[in-house]
Image: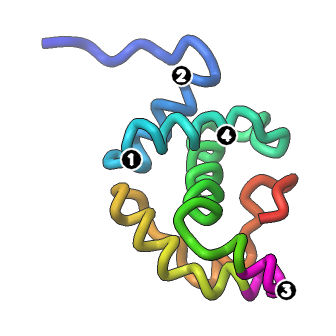
Amino acid sequence: MSGPLPPPRNRREAVAEALARIAPRLPAFEADATLDRALASPGLRGAAPETAARLALVTYARHVFTDYDDLLGEGYDRDSARHFVLDDLNATLTAWGAAPIPEEEEAEADPEGDDPG
């Protein structure tokens, strides 16, 4: 029987482990892209690994797997665009084994602080 896992050696490893816990079915390519986003974001540098992983996951999914950017390009404001893509965003998150975003939280969320999306 093995003992508990050793603690992560660095931030990348800590965020990667958190991401694997919150989105256990996230494909490897998407996990790498999400992890890169979490580590590159100035707004997430001081966040706890779980928080950085969750917020980067949501932001990545919103930009890559929904029409969010197209809606912004058509002149919708951020809150409206987020509202219109919430079902698609939640479908993606749940497919990855992650918790969906409640409507009331989506309207208030600013995942990265420095990200316009």
Q: How far apart are labels 4 and 2 at the CA level? A: 12 Å
Q: How far apart are marks 1 and 2 (CA)?
A: 16 Å
Q: Give the range drawn in magenta.
A: 71-80
Quadrant for the C terminus in the image: bottom right
Residue type for callout 1: Leu
Whether residues under marks 4 and 2 lie with C-beta atoms below 8 angstroms apart, the answer is no
Tell me if residue 38 is in the magenta stretch.
no
Left or right side of 15 for 5: left
Residue receiving disc 2? 13
Residue marked by disc 4: 38
State whether residue 75 is above or below residue 25.
below
The x, y position of residue 21, in whole percent, is: 40, 42
> If you read the primary sequence from the N terminus, does the residue marked by circle 1 or circle 2 appear first?
2
Q: Which residue is drawn at 48% across and 77% down?
A: 88
Question: Which mark is drawn over residue 75?
Answer: 3
Label 4: state its secondary structure. Answer: helix
**Of the numbered discs in the image, which one, if any, rests on residue 26?**
1
Could you classify mark 3 by the number of other residues whose Cα lies within 10 Å: few (under 14), some (14-19), or many (20 or more)? few
Count of residue discs: 4
Nearer mark to the viewer, of 2 and 3: 3
Q: Seen in the image, is 67 located left or right of residue 72?
A: left
Q: Is residue 79 above or below residue 101?
A: below
User: 10 Å neighbourhood of mark 2: few (<14), some, or many (≥20)?
Assistant: some
Q: What residue type is labelled 3?
A: Gly
